[in-house]
Image (cartoon, rainbow, N blue to C red):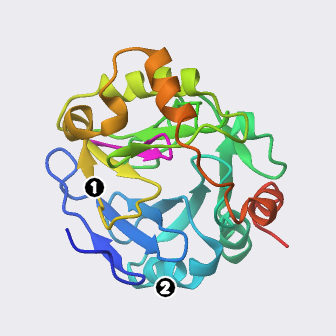
Amino acid sequence: MTAVPALRLYWQQTGHPLEKMLFRQFLDPDSSTFTYLIAASPGRECLIVDPVRQQVGEYLRAVEELGLTLVAALDTHVHADHITALGALADATGCTPRLSAAAGVEGAVPFHDGEEVGLAGVSMRALATPGHTDDSFCFLMDDRVLTGDTLLIRGTGRTDFQNGDSFAAWESLQTLLALPDDTLVYPAHDYKGWTVSTIGEERRHNPRLQVSTAGAYADIMAGLDLPRPGRIDVALPANRKLGRD
C-alpha cells in the first residue's frame, strides 16, 4: 500500500443505512493524525473528532464549502503527540469542545460511557476504552467505529504513560472485538498510509491481538521499549487547556 501524501481530504461513501451521511477524513502529516468531520448530509450541523490545531484552516474551509455548521469538537483522549484544535475551533465557530469526564479538562463539556454524542441524523455512542490512557474513548456508529488510539490498524495504542494500563487496554480491545466483523475501523493515527480497516481484519491480522489472555498482551506491551513521545512535554500542558496558548 502506498504511503499517504501530504495533507489530503479523504472521502468515504457509506453503505446502508448511512448512505447519505457526510464523512470526511483528514490527515495531519506531521503527527500522522486522522481527523473526522461528520454530518448527516451537506448543509447540516456537523461535529469533528480529533482535530489538530495546525490544520484548523483546512477544517474551517471544508465546513464552509459544504455549507455546514460546526456544533461540537471532540477528542478521543488527551493527546500527547500534537496540540488539539478544540479551543481554536470553539473560538472560531462557537462550537462545544468535548472530552471524556476522566480527562478533567476545564472548559470542555464531558461525555460519559454509553452517552449518545451524535447530532440530528447521525448516531454516535461514546464507549469508554481506557488503557492507552485512562481517559480514552471510542465512538461507535451504525457501521463503523472511531477507535482513537485504542485500536490502530495492525497495532494498538501504547500503555506506558498518562495512566496507561495494559490490562485495562486488553479489556477495552475485547469490547471492540465483540463488534461485527464488517464494522469499519477508523483510528486516530496511522504511520504507514492505511486509512481504514475492519474489526474482522484486525482480529485476524493485528499482531498484538494474536494472544488469548490479558497477561500475554501485557507482556507484548511491556516488551515494546518505545521512546518517550517527543512532543509530550509541550502537547499535554497545551491540551489540558484545549490547545489554547
In the displayed structure image, the side of residue 122 where residue 47 appears, left or right: right
Q: Is residue 230 above or below residue 109?
A: below
Q: Pinpoint residue 4: horizontal percent, then vertical percent.
A: 32, 75
Residue 27 seen in render: yes
In the displayed structure image, the side of residue 91 where residue 139 appears, left or right: left
Q: Pinpoint residue 179: horizontal percent, then vertical percent.
A: 28, 27
Which numbered marker is on residue 196? 1
Secondary element at tag 2 = helix
Examine the residues drawn in magenta and state their main secondary structure: strand
Rendered residue at 34%/22% (across/down): 211
Q: Pinpoint residue 194: horizontal percent, then vertical percent.
A: 29, 62
Q: Is residue 47 magenta?
A: no
Numbered range of the magenta stretch: 144-151
Q: Residues within 10 Å of mark 1 (few under 14, many from 20)?
A: some
Q: Is residue 182 above or below residue 91?
A: above
In the displayed structure image, the side of residue 59 where residue 81 appears, left or right: right
Rendered residue at 46%/49% (across/down): 119
Quadrant the C terminus occupies: bottom right
